[in-house]
Image (spheres, rainbow, N blue to C red):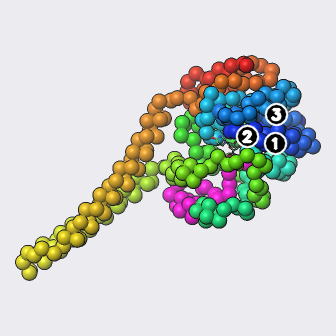
Amino acid sequence: MTKLSVVVPCFNEEAVIEAFDREVREVLGTLPVTYEICYVDDGSRDGTLPKLRRIAAEHGDRARYVSFSRNFGKEAAMLAGLREATGDAVVIMDADLQHPPELIGRMLELYQQGHDQIIARRTRDGDRPLRTALSRLYYRGVNRWVDVELTDGVGDFRLLSRPAVDALLSMPEYNRFSKGLFSWIGFDTVHFDYRNAQRGAGETKWRFGALLNYGMDGLISFNNRPLRVGIWMGAALTALAALYALWVIAMALAFGVSAPGYVTLVAISVGLGGVQLVMLGLIGEYIGRIYYETKRRPHFLVKEAHVPGAAGALTAARTAGEQRAGLGEPVRPVRP
Ligand code: UDP
Ligand code: MG
């Protein structure tokens, strides 16, 4: 029988986590699979962790959790969950019930038909119109720039086959932009749509600034084309400046020198300064990423883990691919 792992990143989800657990188990109970739910507590500061302990105590080997030493972000939490998962197929979903658990059945059917990535794409019903419009605009723009296809409404809610999970785990990069990574690994991928649901309880962790940063990650994580824009822009401006200089010299030769052109000069120097600052910022952004990659820090630190059966399964779950990639020493789970 297929073993299904459900990976759930949780950050301050005490209001909804128990309802989530109940609903997902209800759905999983009706499916022809054995299953486990892998919770990752991303350094929550509320009662999430005690609730996870209780869930784990209650469900034996059908529940496990890892708890981070602080908030490392959803990307790190998903990575930890994928490392923990032992199933033949893994479903990643949010803890806030925005990803309807009943869709797991549909995903499983498609998985059994031989697909490797089954993606649930949400419609944007109920989102604030401004956020929807900005997201649309962003995706339209960004897809011209990056090498991987990023699709609006496609989030992390998806089922991955074991080969797809291993492929993801074989990528050791520190700056993880999952939407891009999912797309980059390829494999046989299918989409289906679902209606966006409101949060079960609690509140979203995304502030507008965080979304902007996320957008920047998407643009920069997958290639260096933005740097090339700098080169072209610089070349075009230099050519323009040269033509302009020739024109000014010609005019001076023909009509003598006079004082006008002050405004033009200021405009040009300010404009060029702006372009240079933007490009410097861009270069800095890439260098910053190189800096983080070269440190080879772990993506997260675990302060507590409940791993049924073999202790240290967090280590065992590390794939051959990861070891090849030389991720350094794994973090040891500490029992409470
Ligand atoms: N999350 C996390 N770490 C974070 C932020 C969020 O693990 O630093 C989890 C959160 O608990 C939830 C999921 O990621 O399960 C999606 O977060 P949220 O619902 O706040 O995002 P939204 O649905 O508004 O995009
Ligand atoms: Mg949510």
Instruction: Please determine whether, in this image, residue 243 is positioned above or below residue 145.
Output: below
Disc on the earlier residue, 3 or 2: 2
Q: Residue at x 80, y 21 (%)?
A: 309
Give the residue type at disc 3.
Answer: Glu
> In the rendered image, which quarter contains the C terminus?
top right
Q: Of the residues tagged 1 and 3, which is closer to the observer?
A: 1
Q: Are marks 2 and 1 in contact (CB under 8 Å)?
A: yes
Across and down, in percent, residue 253 comes to 7, 76
Across and down, in percent, residue 294 comes to 46, 32
Disc on the earlier residue, 1 or 3: 1
Residue 204 within the magenta-colored segment of the rendering: no
* Front residue (pair 258, 114): 258
Give the residue type at disc 1.
Answer: Phe
Q: Residue at x 43, y 44 (%)?
A: 286
Q: Give me the C-alpha separation between circle 3 and circle 2.
A: 19 Å
Q: Specify start and end residues of the magenta stretch as a single range.
A: 136-159
- Residue on which disc 3 sits: 36
Q: Of the residues tagged 3 and 2, which is closer to the observer?
A: 2
> In the rendered image, which quarter contains the N terminus?
top right
- Residue on which disc 2 sits: 13
Instruction: Please determine whether, in this image, residue 188 is positioned above or below residue 193.
Output: above
Q: Residue at x 79, y 32 (%)?
A: 51
The residue carrying mark 2 has its beta carbon less than 8 Å from ligand 1? yes
The answer to whether residue 284 is left or right of residue 55 is: left
Q: Give me the C-alpha separation between circle 2 and circle 1.
A: 10 Å
- Mark number for residue 20? 1
